[in-house]
């Protein structure tokens, strides 16, 4: 079984700042981490490999320093990792990013399953995973909380999706793309041997040319989404009234006030 996992290096959300001139995240000097949801994606891929055999290929698209999240993936047991990095990718929105990742997966070839975290904590759009599936022309199963069954011979997968109103059981053909939630597993910690192996590993960097990307579909050229303005909303003032007296007096008074303000009828 060949599994591709898409991960992302994101700024620690406790230290996020916006450049007021460019309306983009300031990443320089900011602590970066692996997107937390993507750690569950890696773990699920490793569990599936342990059960069905095969290989786990981990991909990230980003600047050269994003190589650190790939080292972490190697340390916990990924078979191969790829850094997709090129100045031509600068300014890519979710559409251009999904395109670049899909081209990378096509380059890897013959993937049975693609797994992503449900969303990245910096953009919070949850668009890249579904976008990759669309460009690969495969089914997408989002917000997966459990994989019930995989039948490689029949090329079938059955999963549980975590929805607001409950859980949904869905069957799909393979290959397919999953986006996973935190309920699905508990990510493992890297072993000392894994950390040593990752530190010595030579991680390949794939450029736009390497993955065969159309220059008009990546970077700013391929990004129809433009951030016009980023701002913090003004703080809203508040006022209140303290009702005093006996409970039997306060309750009718409160009810009348709520009715006057149309909170209740």
Image: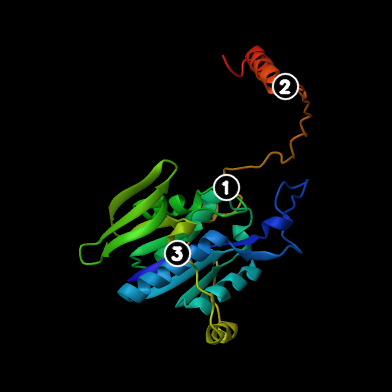
Q: Position of residue 6 (x, y in %)?
A: 49, 63
Give the number of the mark in front: 3 or 1. Answer: 3
Name the element at disc 2.
loop
Residue 109 versus residue 230: which sits nearer the camera? 230
- Above or below residue 210? Residue 74 is below
User: What residue is disc 1 on?
Assistant: 223
Which residue was labeled with disc 2? 246
In the image, taking residue 232 as reference, residue 149 lies left or right, namely left
Seen at 76% across and 64% down, the residue is 29
Picture coordinates of residue 119, whole percent (x, y): 53, 53
- Label 3 neighbour load within 10 Å: few <14, some 14-19, many 20+: some
Q: Looking at the image, which is closer to me, 109 or 60?
A: 60
Tag on residue 185? 3
Q: Residue at x 66, y 42 (%)?
A: 227
Decide which of tag 2 and tag 3 comes sooner along the chain.
3
Q: Nearer the viewer, mark 2 or mark 3?
A: 2
Q: Quadrant of the C terminus?
A: top right
Left or right, residue 244 beside residue 247:
right
Q: Secondary structure at mark 1?
A: loop
Q: Nearer the viewer, residue 140 or 163?
A: 163
Label 3: element kind: loop
Q: Name the residue furthest left.
A: 154
Look at the picture and state if 93 lies above or below 147: above
Q: Residues within 10 Å of mark 1 (few under 14, many from 20)?
A: some
Residue at image coords 79%, 29%: 237
Q: Position of residue 7 (x, y in %)?
A: 52, 63
As measured in the structure, the alpha-carbon distance from the residue carrying label 2 to the one carrying label 3 is 53 Å
């Amino acid at each position: 079984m060949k599994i591709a996992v898409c991960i992302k290096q994101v700024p620690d959300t406790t230290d996020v700042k916006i450049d007021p001139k460019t309306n983009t995240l300031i990443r320089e000097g900011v602590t970066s981490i692996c997107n937390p949801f993507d750690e569950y994606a890696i773990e699920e891929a490793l569990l599936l490999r342990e059960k069905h055999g095969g290989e786990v290929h981990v991909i990230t698209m980003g600047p050269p320093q994003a190589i650190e999240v790939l080292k972490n993936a190697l340390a916990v047991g990924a078979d191969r990792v790829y850094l997709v990095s090129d100045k031509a990718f600068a300014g890519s929105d979710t559409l251009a990013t999904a395109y670049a990742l899909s081209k990378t997966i096509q380059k890897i070839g013959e993937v049975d399953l693609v797994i992503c975290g449900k969303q990245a904590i910096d953009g919070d759009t949850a668009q890249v995973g579904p976008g990759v599936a669309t460009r690969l022309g495969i089914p997408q199963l989002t917000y997966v909380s459990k994989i019930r069954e995989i039948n490689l011979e029949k090329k079938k997968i059955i999963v549980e999706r975590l929805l607001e109103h409950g859980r949904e059981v869905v069957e799909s053909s393979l290959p397919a793309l999953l986006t996973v939630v935190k309920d699905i597993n508990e990510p493992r910690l890297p072993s000392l041997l894994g950390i040593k192996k990752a530190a010595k590993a030579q991680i390949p960097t794939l450029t736009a040319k390497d993955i065969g990307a159309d220059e008009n579909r990546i970077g700013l050229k391929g990004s129809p989404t433009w951030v016009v303005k980023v701002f913090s909303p003004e703080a809203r003032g508040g006022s209140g009234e303290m009702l005093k007296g006996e409970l039997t007096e306060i309750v009718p008074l409160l009810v009348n006030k709520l009715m006057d303000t149309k909170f209740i009828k």
